[in-house]
């Protein structure tokens, strides 16, 4: 599936990644709808990391409405996103992530990994052309100079 910017693979459209739905842990929906502007949660167990740095995986970004994500549509938005990206979300390192860029007001859903080393996370974020990565322990973003494209 291509993201809003046209990145990604058409393999999703051919059904390759839609072999079975990804079951979401019940706490995932509560986490997402309660924190639409910023969260990282493992889809199958509902756990959130307590340290490290969240870095998204290219090709799995979707821009959504923060208001819709926190409202009655939130469950459906997350369920559809999880099923569309089930192939990569089955990786035990994968998290469903979401954040709102305060500079643009855009809210992004993505698949992210937790990287323990700040240096490695910043380097990976730059390599992936990310706008920012998330410092979990300190609860702040670290701008990496990318455009997100």
Image: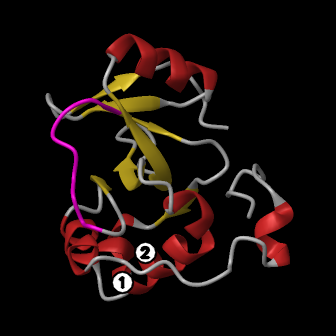
Would residue 123 be counted in the magenta stretch?
no
Q: Majority secondary structure of the magenta segment?
A: loop
Q: Residues within 10 Å of mark 2 (few under 14, many from 20)?
A: many
Distance between mark 1 and mark 2 Cα atoms: 5 Å
How far across and down, in percent of the image, does residue 9 sit? Answer: 80, 56
Whether residue 29 is visible: yes
Mark 2 = which residue? 78
* In front of the other: 35 or 29: 29
The magenta stretch is: 45-53
* Residue 66: assigned label: none
| Residue at figure coordinates x 68%, y 57% from the top left | 3
* In front of the other: 88 or 84: 88
| Residue at figure coordinates x 42%, y 81% from the top left | 23
* Residue 75: assigned label: 1
Q: Is residue 123 above or below residue 26?
A: above
Asked whether disc 1 touches disc 2, contact meaning CB atoms under 8 Å apart, the reply is yes
Along the horizontal axis of the image, is 146 left or right of 55?
Answer: right
**Image quadrant in which you'd find residue 74:** bottom left
């Amino acid at each position: 599936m291509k993201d809003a910017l046209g990145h990604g693979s058409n393999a999703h459209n051919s059904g390759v990644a839609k072999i079975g739905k990804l079951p979401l842990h019940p706490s995932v929906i509560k986490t997402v709808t309660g924190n639409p502007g910023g969260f990282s949660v493992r889809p199958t167990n509902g756990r959130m990391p307590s340290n490290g740095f969240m870095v998204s995986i290219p090709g799995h970004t979707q821009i959504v409405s923060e208001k819709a994500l926190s409202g009655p549509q939130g469950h459906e938005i997350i369920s559809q996103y999880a099923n569309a990206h089930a192939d990569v979300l089955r990786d035990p390192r994968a998290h469903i992530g979401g954040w709102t860029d305060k500079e643009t007001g855009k809210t992004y859903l993505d698949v992210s990994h937790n990287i323990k080393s700040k240096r490695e996370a910043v380097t990976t974020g730059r390599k992936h052309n990310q706008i920012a990565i998330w410092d979990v322990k300190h609860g702040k973003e670290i701008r990496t100079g990318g455009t997100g494209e």
